[in-house]
Amino acid sequence: MLIFKGDKLLVRDVIFEFDDRPKKGKILRSSEDLPPPWREVPAWCEVDEAHVSQGGAEWLDLRAVWQRWGDRAFVYAGTSYQYMNWLRQARFCSNCAAPLVPKEEDRGLLCGECGRTYYAPLHPAIIVAVERDGKLLLAHNSRMPAGRCSVIAGFVEPGESLEQTLAREVMEEVGIEVEDIRYFGSQSWPFPCSLMLGFTARWKDGELHPDGTELDDANWYAPDALPDIPPPLSISRRLIDDFVTRMSQ
Ligand SMILES: [Zn+2]
């Protein structure tokens, strides 16, 4: 069983999954108390903030779990985390304010008053590696550590295709047009409920003008002269590594 407290997971030495639910302390919610479809994801429970773990255990956020145990553990724990996080936020119907109850047929929530059904939200976002003449576009986001640069990303808005989102985000953030958009791969990103859809694209027209709010710097980088980039495992890093590999062939 995965034991969460807030956004952190209980871990001990080499394990992040425990045989039993905690016997002491208050359990706020648990997959074991939900109908069968809810128990088809890795078992989880959420303890309250006063919960004290026994010797040798520590609480890690999902990024740290990822660093320590890799992609499979991140996806495994991230799946349960997204359901747990949604259940603690989606407690009442946004149509009539009555309490929501977990459905028996699937992992949805049902309003007993007005009958409206809710499902766990997923927010798609594009992330794109743009190339120009053997160089890669990397930008510094004002929320990232100083000196750290990454590829362009942004959320899909209603009415948009993924290609339109990509073109809009690149134009808004750095002021250039792109072409030759190709799908690269995707990654679940449970902070709190994103799905990252990765692409590559080529520069078409325009010069770099960072928007000055979200991005305060952007440049074209040769594969042998990259700045500080995101750690391994993220799809942003996979896009950058893919660029470096292709340029070295
Ligand atoms: Zn309702």
Image (tube, grey):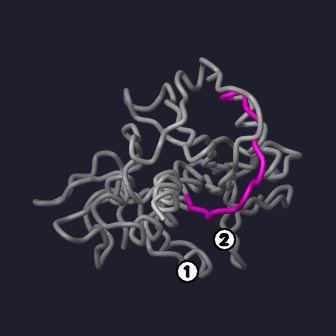
Give the residue furthest to the right.
159
Span colored in magenta: 173-188
| Front residue of this view, candidates 20 and 136 | 136
In magenta stretch: residue 141:
no
Label 1 residue SS: helix
Which is more N-terminal, label 1 or label 2?
Answer: 1
Tell me the amino acid under the disc marked 2. Answer: Arg
Residue picked out by circle 1: 40
Q: Is residue 126 above or below residue 149?
A: below
Q: Is residue 107 above or below residue 146?
A: below
Numbered circle sitting on residue 243: none
Is label 2 in contact with label 1 (beta carbons under 8 Å)?
yes
> Quadrant location of the N terminus?
bottom left
Q: Residue at x 53, y 33 (%)?
A: 139
Where residue 231 appears, x then y in whole percent? 37, 50
Specify the principal SS of the magenta part: strand
Tell me: is circle 2 under 8 Å from ligand 1: no
Q: Is residue 67 left or right of residue 86?
A: left
Q: Is residue 101 left or right of residue 242?
A: right
Residue picked out by circle 2: 107
Q: Residue at x 65, y 57 (%)?
A: 197
Where residue 113 appears, x then y in whole percent? 82, 56
Quadrant in the picture for residue 186: bottom right
Tell me: is circle 1 under 8 Å from ligand 1: no
In magenta stretch: residue 175:
yes
Tell me the amino acid under the disc marked 1. Answer: Glu
Where residue 3 appears, x then y in whole percent? 35, 63
